[in-house]
Amino acid sequence: MTRPASKLLAGALALPLVLAGCGGQQLGEESTSDGPFRVFFTADMTGPTATLSRALLSGMKVAVDDANAAGGIGGREVVLIENNDQNDPTSAVSALQELINSGEKPDLVYPGGSSAVSLSLLPITTREEILSLGGTVASQLNDPEAFPYHFGTAELTDAYVPPFVQIAEEQGFEKIAMIFSNNPTGQAAEAAYRKEITAAGLEFVSVGYQPEALDMTAQLEQLRSQNPDALIFEGYGTPVQYLMRSRAGMRWDIPSFSNQTSSTYPFVEDFSEEQLRGVQVIQSNWTVNEGETPAEMVEFIEKVKAVPEGDTLPQTGVRLPAVSAATVQLTAWAVEQNGGKTDTASIIETFYNDLPEEGGDATPWLTDSKGPNSYQYSEDNHFPFSPPEIFLYIDPGMYDDGGMYVPGKRS
């Protein structure tokens, strides 16, 4: 793995996009196969999800630095263009369109830290035939017909449902409740859980909440009145704190299971063991400290620690930098495999035909370090495949210094 030292920084929304790099590219310069390989990264850098976005950015920086240390992508220096969209789709769209209009069309787009932002950007990347890879997971994003140039590096929400259904059947649950955020990510999660749970012959009830809500007691009381056997909770960032605070205030210790997005929240920092009684979080096996960390992951973690945003590792874990780094790593790998062709069509053709089945130290990304390579893209599926056995339901804990999740750990 190798990465770039040149970066393009974009400050707050009111500030213009700024390019920086060894190549000294100027605004308005046309993107060509001989110029820099531009990577546009947009996320919330100053709002409620800024810590999570900084974690994503740390992985991008490591991957870009590695690519440049190896000679760039197709011999082109990689330049990282950062934009602060504050999780606002309109802001993200404006920034990307401004970049395109300036003549600095990016070669690769990381389309936001939320599915709402991604869904707003993909019509533009589709129209402009720009490759996009990202870690957002709403099922609407996996639509190769509508978004032929977009690929995911994190499992879709749907992948996390079979492991829960398996637990529900083992524990004899008959009625499942779910509380979810009323945004594209939450709605996609609710639809996925509803489909799989009812298909398994179990009863399913749900209620949504507004992401800006500060109290979810009314919604939880609505669910409790229906006497469910288990609760699934969905959210991202701060809303999870208010959700769990409401649950604790109700003294409702129903068996409660996070989905993937809510698992990133640092529960043990804000809630006691009593308040978390019955709560379990889901993690991918490669992010859990099981006593031995693969060498390639140790190397990646040390590189993340070396960038300023790497201070997020103990807060948000290694998963976020890993899935963001994979966007650049996959692209650089594909270009190396296809003989140096950096056009979107050639990269996608390589994704379809040449990705290895086995991973570990054979690939520069880490999501396969404890299992097969999950990136098996096809014309019908642009997201990772994930067998249920790679997911673990575990007690809430904390990340260690390297961002590996330790069940039950408290400071």
Image: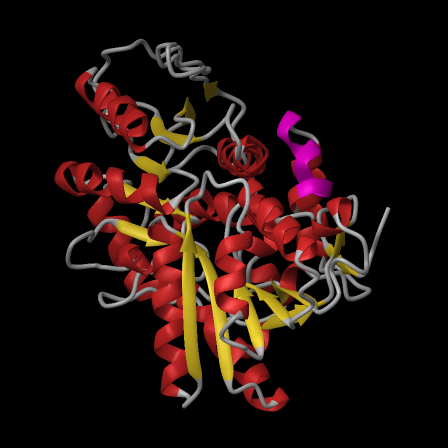
Say which of 199 and 202 sits in front. 202
Say which of 329 and 171 sits in front. 171
Instruction: Give percent across and percent down for residue 31.
Output: 23, 23
Instruction: Give percent across and percent down for residue 174.
Output: 51, 87
Dividing the picture into quarters, in which one does residue 37 lie? top left
Magenta: main secondary structure equals helix
Identify the residue shown where x is 32% and y is 48%: 339
Residue 356, compared with residue 272, is above or below; it is below
Identity of the residue furthest to the right in this view = 411
Magenta stretch holds residue 152 = no
Identity of the residue furthest to the left in this view = 127
Say which of 230 and 407 sits in front. 230
Q: Is residue 12 visible?
A: yes
Instruction: Give percent across and percent down for residue 305.
Output: 71, 35
| Part of the protein shown in magenta | 308-315
Left/right placement of residue 13 relative to residue 163 reads left
Query: Number of numbered discs present?
Result: 0
Q: Is residue 385 visible?
A: no
Which quarter of the figure is the N terminus placed in? top right
Identify the residue shown where x is 69% and y is 41%: 315
Give the colour scheme of this rendering: secondary structure
Identify the residue shown where x is 29% and y is 22%: 95
Left/right placement of residue 127 relative to residue 31 reads left
Dividing the picture into quarters, in which one does residue 376 lie? bottom left
Residue 18, compared with residue 342, is above or below; it is above
Identify the residue shown where x is 69% and y is 55%: 248
Residue 250, compared with residue 28, is above or below; it is below
Left/right placement of residue 353 relative to residue 312 reads left
